[in-house]
Image: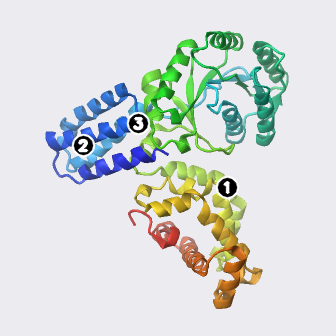
Amino acid sequence: MFENLTDRLSRTLKNISGRGRLTEDNIKDTLREVRMALLEADVALPVVREFVNAVKERAVGQEVAKSLTPGQVFVKIVQSELEKAMGEANEALNLAAQPPAVIMMAGLQGAGKTTSVAKLSKFLRTRQKKSVLVVSADVYRPAAIKQLETLANEVEVEFFPSDVSQKPIDIANAAIGHAKRKFIDVVILDTAGRLHVDEAMMDEIKALHAAVKPIETLFVVDAMTGQDAANTAKAFNEALPLTGVVLTKVDGDARGGAALSIRHITGKPIKFLGVGEKTDALEPFHPDRVASRILGMGDVLSLIEQVERGVDKEKAMKLASKVKSGGNFDLEDFREQLQQMKNMGGMMGLIEKLPGVGQLPPEAMAQIQDGKMTRQMEAIINSMTPGERRNPDIIKGSRKRRIAAGSGTEIQDVNRLLKQFTQMQKMMKKMSSKGGMQKMMRAMGGMMPGGMKLPGR
């Protein structure tokens, strides 16, 4: 997420963060680099201009001059202004309405609207314990109605059937009436994708909005269109009273222009980020956490939340008590951890939230990104006998050759896995002892591909 911007800004700010004294000259050079980084990230020009002026004003003022570490204060100012540009705090959905609370989703064709409806309904069902009904008012694309029905079954929410022969307003009213009778908390209304230049389609969605009076009107837009996403959102906002934005395909956006431009241009908050194809790949948008990630400082709060959601509490408790009571952490347990990691969005989804991850060598990042490392480790463990998994010490020469052949890997891959497993075993022992978490963090360095250390360790 936003790799190019993170890389460029991290390098620029690293040069100034150690400075004991800031002058007009070195601030000017750094701000020029920051401006270039933002423009290359496709951030809208008015946003860049306002951002740079705000940083400059604070940097040459008393705030920095009085500080003992002016370079570090400068980085904090940049972080604070990034947060301000994106909205300062997370703005949650407003569902304070007589049930059902109606959420209308609008956007261009191909922005990921129908998928976002499914993700949002799953988010509301699992994290906010709401009953949800989804309905499609897209009478121009029969496949859209079928797609939503399939996704609704997958995320276990109720689907209200509709047909291309019906009028969108009739579909919406029938769905809301059904939700009232069944005491459903939230109705999410999927609408047809439209171009903001298509007057007839825009008139239709205005009429639909006036008829159903949704409490939330969310504009779904593709992050990879950069500042165009902000301009499109502005055009829609002039036609509809939008309450927020869902930014999709953020995991494929190396620049970050949309995230930094939308709030300034539309005045509307980004409420959610679509960070992957899976139905649980939707995150509430926290400007402070995103600013921290952009500056290469990681996002530990989101990481903790992700782990809490993804970990099977029962299995985790069993493993903890096993290790605490002196039981051996074995390769069966290790495989279980790999599978849990997959449930949490894979190793990349976890590692990219750690501070300084951009400093990892490119070949290590590539290995993590395509999930090859986790798949390979699982294949190697699956090629072992139950006895070998319980007692890895018996895995020597001929056994290693058999395991490598059975998993389609090389002997050095088997050796690497065994080395990483031994480090994990030590880590588990440290966790179960006093002061375990600090010891575990010190030990985590060796868990990276090929035994590389975590950045800053």
Horizontal side of 318 relative to 170 (left or right) equals left
Q: Amino acid at mark 1?
A: Asn
Quarter of the image containing the C terminus? Answer: bottom left
Question: Circle 1 sits in a helix, a strand or a loop, which is it?
Answer: helix
Q: Position of residue 296 (x, y in %)?
A: 40, 50
Q: Give the class, few, some or many, for how many residues have Cα within 10 Å of label 3's Cα (few <14, many ≥20).
A: many
Of callouts 3 and 1, the N-terminal one: 3
Q: Going 78% across and 36% down the picture, which residue do you hit?
A: 152
Q: Amino acid at mark 3?
A: Glu
Q: Which numbered disc, 2 or 3, marks the residue closer to the eye?
A: 2
Horizontal side of 245 relative to 335 (left or right) equals left
Quadrant assignment, res 112: top right
Q: In whole angstroms, how far apart are the C-alphas of marks 2 and 3?
A: 19 Å
Q: In this rendering, is residue 180 above or below 418?
A: above
Q: Which numbered disc, 3 or 1, marks the residue closer to the eye?
A: 1
Horizontal side of 188 relative to 300 (left or right) equals right
**Residue 320 appears in view:** no
Where is mark 3, residue-wise?
83
Q: Give the class, few, some or many, for how many residues have Cα within 10 Å of label 2's Cα (few <14, many ≥20).
A: some
Q: Nearer the viewer, residue 38 or 81?
A: 38
Question: Circle 3 sits in a helix, a strand or a loop, which is it?
Answer: helix
Picture disc at residue 392? none
Of callouts 2 and 3, the N-terminal one: 2
Q: Position of residue 7 (x, y in %)?
A: 38, 49
Q: In this rendering, is residue 70 above or below 116?
A: below
Where is mark 1, residue-wise?
343
Q: Are marks 3 and 1 in contact (CB under 8 Å)?
A: no
Q: Position of residue 205 (x, y in %)?
A: 66, 14
Where is mark 2, residue-wise?
30
